[in-house]
Amino acid sequence: MRILQTVEKIPGGIMIVPLLLGATINTFFPQVLEIGGFTTALFQEGALALIGAFLFCMGAQIPIRAAGTTLGKGAAILSGKLGAGIAVGLGVALLLPSGTLLGLAPVAIIAAMTNSNGGLYVALTEEFGNETDTGAVSVISVNDGPFFTLVALGAAGLADIPLLALVAVLVPIVLGFILGNLDEDIRSFLRPGQRLLIPFFAFPLGAGIDFATIIESGPPGVLLGIMTVVISGFGAMAVLYLVQVARRRPREQRNLVSGAAEASTAGNAVATPAAIALADPTYQAVEAAATAQVAGAVVTTAVLTPVFVTLVYRWQMSRGIDPRNEFSVEDPGEPERET
């Protein structure tokens, strides 16, 4: 049986197939993952540790001269995603008479569209992008949690910027980056870990998803997921493209895969409506509905984002823009791509 070849034919399959398997088991047979021991530790609770190991391996692959490009990409796609989500959410709240869009509450729109699934992002950029795309997660991780939603809703004084959470993401990347640049043998040793670890952290990420959330959220949750992929994805890509044009990068170097990979909703965004309601009691009336809508967006984007990234990747490749060769074209302002 050629299981791996079959999985790889599916857009983002090495990530999405284990994720959907985990969600299926969690939805219909959750007790299987709760027997304890190594089974529970690996298949239900192991996502964070495995993503940390993945980021360590990934950090080791970033050449020191590519660090500036990595940070620049992260800032560009973060700005694009945040700008798109906040603009749509506030537009609905301020411009529509009902203050909602087809049942979608502004708090749900902003929470879903400004938070991204870091695990899905790193898996997709590893498969379709390059080291600077994947390394940009060190910047975009700042959108985790309710902070930007609170800012957008006028409650910025009730929350703190999650600097410690950002540092926690940076540590494994920085350590891997240092070791990989100190010793080429370490870089080579850690290189296979980038691909090997993806299905192992994808499954427990899926094990935190229940397909019943789509039914509970109804059409608004699915609609929110589609909006997140299309609007926030294109928003991130647009800002990244404008930055590349401003820097006068050659057309064949204008790689947008990282912007497309940012078109998802993080699982922890489900808790944002409750945090908003705690900070501002006026949101308690919409808390339950908004929570269900964000949960629906999490599941919907987990399925659609890999497809979106695959389409963007194929569109780029048809125009001679290969992310793996992003730095192979002579460009004094960019780092050389290591082989």
Image (cartoon, rainbow, N blue to C red):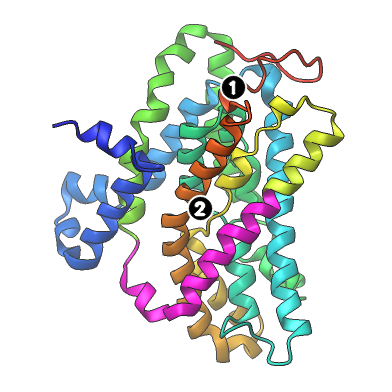
Q: In this view, does 323 lie above or below 11?
A: above
Whether residue 233 is in magenta: the answer is yes
Whether residue 167 is in magenta: the answer is no
Residue 20 as seen in the image, left or right of residue 51: left
Mark 2 surroundings within 10 Å by alpha-carbon count, few (fewer than 14), some (14 through 19), many (20 or more):
many
User: Looking at the rendering, which quadrant does residue 191 occupy?
Assistant: top left
Mark 1 surroundings within 10 Å by alpha-carbon count, few (fewer than 14), some (14 through 19), many (20 or more):
many
Q: What residue type is labelled 2?
A: Asn
State which region is magenta. 209-236
Q: Position of residue 47 (x, y in %)?
A: 37, 47
Q: Is residue 115 visible?
A: no
Q: Which amino acid does label 1 sit on?
A: Ile
| Viewer-proximal residue among 311 and 132 | 311
- Which labelled disc corresponds to residue 190? none
What's the distance in space between the residues labelled 2 and 1, CA to CA?
22 Å
Q: Is residue 240 above or below residue 254?
A: below
Q: Is residue 58 visible?
A: yes
> Of helix, strand and loop, which mostly describes the magenta segment?
helix
> Mark 2 sits on what residue?
117
SS for dot 2:
loop
Q: In this view, does 247 lie above or below 183?
A: below
Residue 32 as seen in the image, left or right of residue 183: left
Residue at 63% across / 77% down in the picture?
A: 107
| Viewer-proximal residue among 165 and 118 | 118
> Mark 1 sits on what residue?
62
Question: In which quadrant is the C terminus drawn?
Answer: top right
Question: In which quadrant is the N terminus drawn?
Answer: top left
Q: Position of residue 99 (x, y in %)?
A: 69, 87
